[in-house]
Amino acid sequence: MQATGLDYVDLGRLTATVEADRHRYQSAEPFPHIVLDGILKPGAAAALAAQFPPVDHKIWKHHLHLHSHKFACNRFGAMPGPFQAVLGELNSKALCQYLEALTGIPDLMADDELEGGGLHQITPGGFLKIHADFNYHPGTHQHRRINLLVYLNPEWEEAWDGNLELWSSDMSRCARSIAPVLNRCVIFNTTDSAYHGHPRPLACPPGHTRKSLALYYYTDVRPAEETSSPHSTLYKRTPLESPLLHQLRLFRRYLLSRSSTQILRSAVRRARGR
């Protein structure tokens, strides 16, 4: 595999170790994955971190529901130019060829719509419950096969509870915990049992957020043993979360996510219905 010159992604560094990395990837537990530091060229990651749009920027869509609390932007044209350039390279043919060599999955295709991907940012108190991702692209109906995450956090502490967790298929244990430090990339297979997330509320101090890029890759077909009926994101409860406490926390967050006006209107409607 020949490395093609890219301005931001260090494809030469990736391809130089792809043979050894392929074995590590395909033999990893609890499902095929790899952690790679330095996916972007020196200086590129730091520049992106410095230019990462703050949460009050107009590009962000606030996702607040029972299973996640985060900010996201998948509108390519609304992103600052450097982010468009980096995402373009991560969606390039050259990167797809590298991912094919790494994962052993042929005919990978990038998602120019960035469905569920793009820029992600989580503020203090935010979280993303353990889950397996949706399995078909809603527009193209292709099979979702690979996740690629790039973290852009120059300062990070384990105590902030923002690590990416990879869980066993029976949800009995966290098999790996990965700190989201600057220029760290995590690549993994997307299947119905590839459970991942960061389930505890982010505990970083004010002024810090958890910043990342997310890209997903697809194929027209996939092995029969991995194929299932179309589904949305499959959220899971960890062993540390009691069923009752889990439901109470979800209900509380649901109430907090609604404005006082919405709650009042609902109460008025119920009263009128009596």
Image: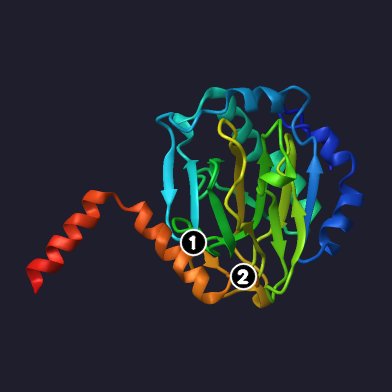
Three-letter amino acid code at disc 1? His
What secondary structure is found at the residue carrying circle 1?
Answer: loop
Residue denoted by label 2: 192
Q: Count residues near mark 2 (Cα–Cα under 10 Å), then give few for <14, some for 14-19, many for 20+.
A: some
Q: Residue at x 73, y 32 (%)?
A: 9
First reached walking from the N terminus: tag 1 or tag 2: 1
> Disc 1 to disc 2, how far (Cα)?
16 Å
User: What's the coloring here?
Assistant: rainbow
Nearer-the-camera pick, 271 or 44: 271
Q: Is residue 116 above or below residue 9?
A: below
Which amino acid does the dot numbered 2 rest on? Asp
Which quadrant does the C terminus fall into? bottom left
Query: 73 above or below 146?
Result: above
175 horizontally vs 233: left or right: right
Q: Is residue 208 visible?
A: yes
Q: Nearer the viewer, residue 27 or 142?
A: 27
Instruction: Name the residue at 51% across, 70% down.
Output: 245
Residue bearing the label numbered 1: 141
Q: Is residue 56 left or right of residue 146?
A: left
What x and y, as percent, mark residue 143?
Answer: 58, 62
